[in-house]
């Protein structure tokens, strides 16, 4: 696993500013991995309960349908 401390640090430093975070970059450069693995692990290690974390992968149609039905 590549830890990517620079990018994680940027996310953490702006964690509670009330804004939505958007991560951009080339295809297959690790954007989803940064959010769904590295940042997720950081939050859990720092006391956030798993039940409070929500991950949506909108590229999968079945998940999109589930979200729309709410």
Image (cartoon, grey):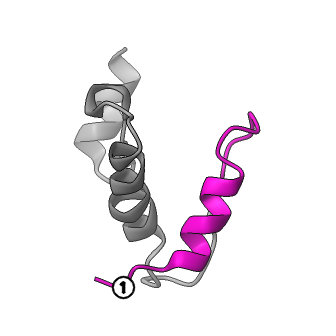
Q: Horizontal and vertical percent for residue 4?
A: 48, 80
Q: Is residue 37 above or below residue 48?
A: below
Residue at position x 36%, y 85% from top?
2
Q: Where does the C terminus fall, quadrant-wise?
A: top left
Q: Which residue is mark 1?
A: 2
Q: Is residue 12 magenta?
A: yes
Q: Horizontal and vertical percent for residue 24?
A: 63, 70
The secondary structure type at the circle numbered 1 is loop
Which residue is situated farthest in the front direction here? 46
| Residue 66 location, quadrant | top left
Crowd tier of the residue under label 1, counting other residues whose Cα lies within 10 Å: few below 14, some 14–19, many 20 or above: few
Q: Is residue 5 above or below residue 61?
A: below
Q: Is residue 15 above or below residue 53?
A: below
Q: Is residue 43 above or below residue 41?
A: above
Residue at position x 76%, y 39% from top?
17
| Stretch in magenta | 1-21
Q: Is residue 59 visible?
A: no
Q: Horizontal and vertical percent for residue 16?
A: 68, 38
Number of marks drawn: 1
The residue nearer to you, when weighing 10 against 35, is 10
Q: Is residue 58 visible?
A: yes
Q: Horizontal and vertical percent for residue 53?
A: 37, 34
Q: Where does the N terminus fall, quadrant-wise?
A: bottom left
| Residue 42 location, quadrant | bottom left
């Amino acid at each position: 696993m590549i830890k990517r401390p620079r990018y994680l640090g940027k996310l953490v430093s702006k964690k509670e500013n009330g804004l939505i975070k958007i991560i951009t970059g080339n295809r297959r450069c690790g954007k989803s991995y940064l959010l769904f693995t590295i940042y997720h692990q950081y939050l859990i290690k720092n006391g956030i309960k798993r039940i409070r974390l929500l991950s949506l992968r909108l590229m999968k149609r079945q998940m999109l349908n589930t979200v729309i039905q709410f």
